Image (cartoon, rainbow, N blue to C red):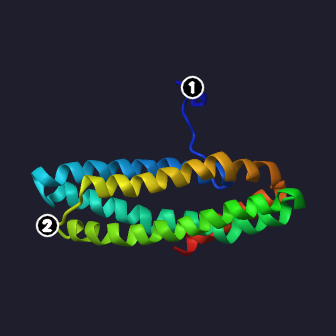
Amino acid sequence: MSDSLIPVAPGFETPLEMLEACHGRLQGQLETLARLAAWLPAHGADDQAQQAASAVMRYFDLAAANHHMDEEDDLFPVLLARVDASRRAQLQALIDWILADHRRMFAAWALMRERLAAIAEGKAAELAEEQVEAFANRYRQHIAREESELLPYARELLTGEDIAALSKTMVARRRQG
């Protein structure tokens, strides 16, 4: 098989594509969470449930947190510096919404994490499918808005130097963790 047919995951040299790929991985974790909620009533916090809960916690605690920092600390300031005055208010409103949603997502994650931590320890814990769906919907709506509004701004406004700097800070952030 030719190497050209094998999909290649984006690397840190393409930070916008990395942010988008993170959204895809996050969707996968939300699917795992939904499967876990469906699994628990019949199987309880067995080994498979414990492993799934641990994996979801690891992802949200590390990768999702880094993703938010990539945006908040590195991407947003550069976008605001690059946007022209006629679109500044629109971009600022989008960023303000994303920042507020990050706070809502963090609060929702804290509650979900408590339940997952109990499951990861093998304790009986309720993980209602409705709660998981509400949690997942918040993330899906957030991702949709970032992909349809924020990333187009970034692709338009960022210079090659901006992309290189974003790449460098993303790598450094992950080396610290």
Q: Provide residue 156's location: percent of width, then percent of height.
A: 80, 48
Q: What residue sits 10% from the left and 50% below the top?
A: 42
Residue wearing tag 1: 2
The answer to which of 28 and 166 lies nearer the viewer is: 28
Q: What residue sits 35% from the left and 52% below the top?
A: 133
Q: Provide residue 99's location: percent of width, then percent of height.
A: 60, 68
**What's the residue type where badge 2 is placed?**
Ala
Label 2 with label 1: CB-CB less than 8 Å? no
Question: Is 147 situated above or below 107?
Answer: above
Quarter assignment of residue 119: bottom left
Q: Secondary structure at mark 2?
A: loop
Question: Is 1 situated above or below 162?
Answer: above
Q: What residue sits 36% from the left and 65% below the top?
A: 57
Question: Is 98 situated above or below 136?
Answer: below
**Foreground: disc 2 or disc 1:** 2
Q: CA distance from mark 2 to mark 1?
A: 48 Å
Residue 38 showing in the rendered view: yes
Disc tally is: 2
Left/right of residue 41 with respect to residue 130 in the rendered view: left
Quarter assignment of residue 124: bottom left
Q: Residues within 10 Å of mark 2 (few under 14, many from 20)?
A: some
Residue wearing tag 2: 124
Residue 14 showing in the rendered view: no
Left/right of residue 2 with respect to residue 90 in the rendered view: left
| Marks 2 and 1, the one that precedes in the sequence | 1
Q: What residue sits 26% from the left and 52% below the top?
A: 129
**What's the residue type where badge 1 is placed?**
Ser
Quarter assignment of residue 3: top right
The answer to which of 103 and 117 lies nearer the viewer is: 103
Q: Residues within 10 Å of mark 1 (few under 14, many from 20)?
A: few
Q: Secondary structure at mark 1?
A: loop
